Image (spheres, rainbow, N blue to C red):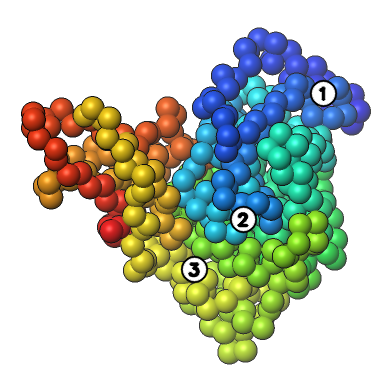
């Protein structure tokens, strides 16, 4: 095994030498901060890595950190560079006084993803180091002590689940999109080491989120093994009493689709229940009295007291609101939303260029902005919202559910402004459910 690990280290560093370091974008200026670590020696993290964090400007003392972890492969790794700039995830972080952190591992395409997505291979230690360094850089030293809410896609799900099993005392909740850690040795890939389930991990809320085309309804192909791995992980954890659920995306394969609308709602409930009042204190125990259960497979959830099946095999959901959202999600991902998004603020006009600031709607994000001049609609930003994997969104989305680059700006140029007049402009936010702000 030592010879194999060393060979992988040599291969990875050789491939790294053939590839220039990732372009570091966008620039990290307050309230954004970034640190980058070079590749370490064998036995530690063998890839360079960037960590970018967003600190809510109004927060004096952080209560937690939300981690948005990309998947395997060079493209997904590079997409991690924009993760902390996601307005929708910032809305969740800001609500709970949390930082939003996005790693970007510089993994060459042909290198073994397990060398970072298994936190025992150095990425877990690098993550904890970045919390100390970013805490000092941002003036928030408590960042190194607060609980973690983890979201991961593919290999990032493997990483997030691995952190639950290796550091359960620090994790408030974990959402595993398509990837899970293995609990038995994979004989085909000896670099994948099996995890054990510590008792403390059973109290951490976890949600497995595979796409239906990853082995549920489509049994062949590149990602057909995702569902069997998710099912095995869920079954083993739930049999021991873990607070774990499964939300099968009914529309997708390995892409993230509309999963953020369910993930953010679920994490919102978990953070509300588990974040401590004082930085440095461990997460609170997750309440279980209001839990709902659902059969797997199935799409109907009921209060736990009314569940007729075996609870040790049932999908665990924290409360009624999340359970109702889950029922919509596993049906068609169309989670209802009746609350309009926040209105844009700080609208400014310089020459014929209009700029503004806006926060995303917690439930449904931002799809676009409507621009009015003297009460008449004259434009939309962007002209056409984009997202090849789900609902069109203002920032666009890459494969690992991070904003497209270059980042879309909140700016509109009025090329037909009437000369010699002072028109009145209005900016209206529209969320992905089609609801308009004031």
| Percent of width and height locating residue 182 | 75, 50
**What number is the disc on residue 40?**
1
Element at label 2: loop
To which quarter of the image does residue 331 belong?
bottom left
Residue at 44 percent of width and 29 percent of height: 405
Direction from residue 412 to residue 297 in the image, left or right: right
- Relative placement, left or right, of 170 versus 413 is right
Q: Residue furthest top?
A: 18
Q: Is mark 1 in CB contact (under 8 Å) with mark 2?
A: no
- What is the x, y in percent for residue 229? 66, 53
Residue 41 occupies which quadrant of the picture? top right
Residue 97 circle label: 2
User: What residue is drawn where x is 68% and y is 78%?
Assistant: 288
Q: Which x, y percent locates residue 124?
A: 79, 41
Q: Quadrant of the N terminus?
A: top right
Is residue 397 visible to the viewer in this orientation of the structure? yes
Contact between marks 1 and 3 (CB within 8 A): the answer is: no
As helix, strand or loop, the secondary structure at mark 3 comes to helix
Q: Is tag 1's residue or tag 2's residue first in the polypeptide sequence? A: 1
Of the numbered discs 2 and 3, the one sitting upstream in the chain is 2
Residue 338 vs residue 217, the one in the foreground = 338
Q: If the image is split into quadrants, where does the C terminus sit? A: bottom left
């Amino acid at each position: 095994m030592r010879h194999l690990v060393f060979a992988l280290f040599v291969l990875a560093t050789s491939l790294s030498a053939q590839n220039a370091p990732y372009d570091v974008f966008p620039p990290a200026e307050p309230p954004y901060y970034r640190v980058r670590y070079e590749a370490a020696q064998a036995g530690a993290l063998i890839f360079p890595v960037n960590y970018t964090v967003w600190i809510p400007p109004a927060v004096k003392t952080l209560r937690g950190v939300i981690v948005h972890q990309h998947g395997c492969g060079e493209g997904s790794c590079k997409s991690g560079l924009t993760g902390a700039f996601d307005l929708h995830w910032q809305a969740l972080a800001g609500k709970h006084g949390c930082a939003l952190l996005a790693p970007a591992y510089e993994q060459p395409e042909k290198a073994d993803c397990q060398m970072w997505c298994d936190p025992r291979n150095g990425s877990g230690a690098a993550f904890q180091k970045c919390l100390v360094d970013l805490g000092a850089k941002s003036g928030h030293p408590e960042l190194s002590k607060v609980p973690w809410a983890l979201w991961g896609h593919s290999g990032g799900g493997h990483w997030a689940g691995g952190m639950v099993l290796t550091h359960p005392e620090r994790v408030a909740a974990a959402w595993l999109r398509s990837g899970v850690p293995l609990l038995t040795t994979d004989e085909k890939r000896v670099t994948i080491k099996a995890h054990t389930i510590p008792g403390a991990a059973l109290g951490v809320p976890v949600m497995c989120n595979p796409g239906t085309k990853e082995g549920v309804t489509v049994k062949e192909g590149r990602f057909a093994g995702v569902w069997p791995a998710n099912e095995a992980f869920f079954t083993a954890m739930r049999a021991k009493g873990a607070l774990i659920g499964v939300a099968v995306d009914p529309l997708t394969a390995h892409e993230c689709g509309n999963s953020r609308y369910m993930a953010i709602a679920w994490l919102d409930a978990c953070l509300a229940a588990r974040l401590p009042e004082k930085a440095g204190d461990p997460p609170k125990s997750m309440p279980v009295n209001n839990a709902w259960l659902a059969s797997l497979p199935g799409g109907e959830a009921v209060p736990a007291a009314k569940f007729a099946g075996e609870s040790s095999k049932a999908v665990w959901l924290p409360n009624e609101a999340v359970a109702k959202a889950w029922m919509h999600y596993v049906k068609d991902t169309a989670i209802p939303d009746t609350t309009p998004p926040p209105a844009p603020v700080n609208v400014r006009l310089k020459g014929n260029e209009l700029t503004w600031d806006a926060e995303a709607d917690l439930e449904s994000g931002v799809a676009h902005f409507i621009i009015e001049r003297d009460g008449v609609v004259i434009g939309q930003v962007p002209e056409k919202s984009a997202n090849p994997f789900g609902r069109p969104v203002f920032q666009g989305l890459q494969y690992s559910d991070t904003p497209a680059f270059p980042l879309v700006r909140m700016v509109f140029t009025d090329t037909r402004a009437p000369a010699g007049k002072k028109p009145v402009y209005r900016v209206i936010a529209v969320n992905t459910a089609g609801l308009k702000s004031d």
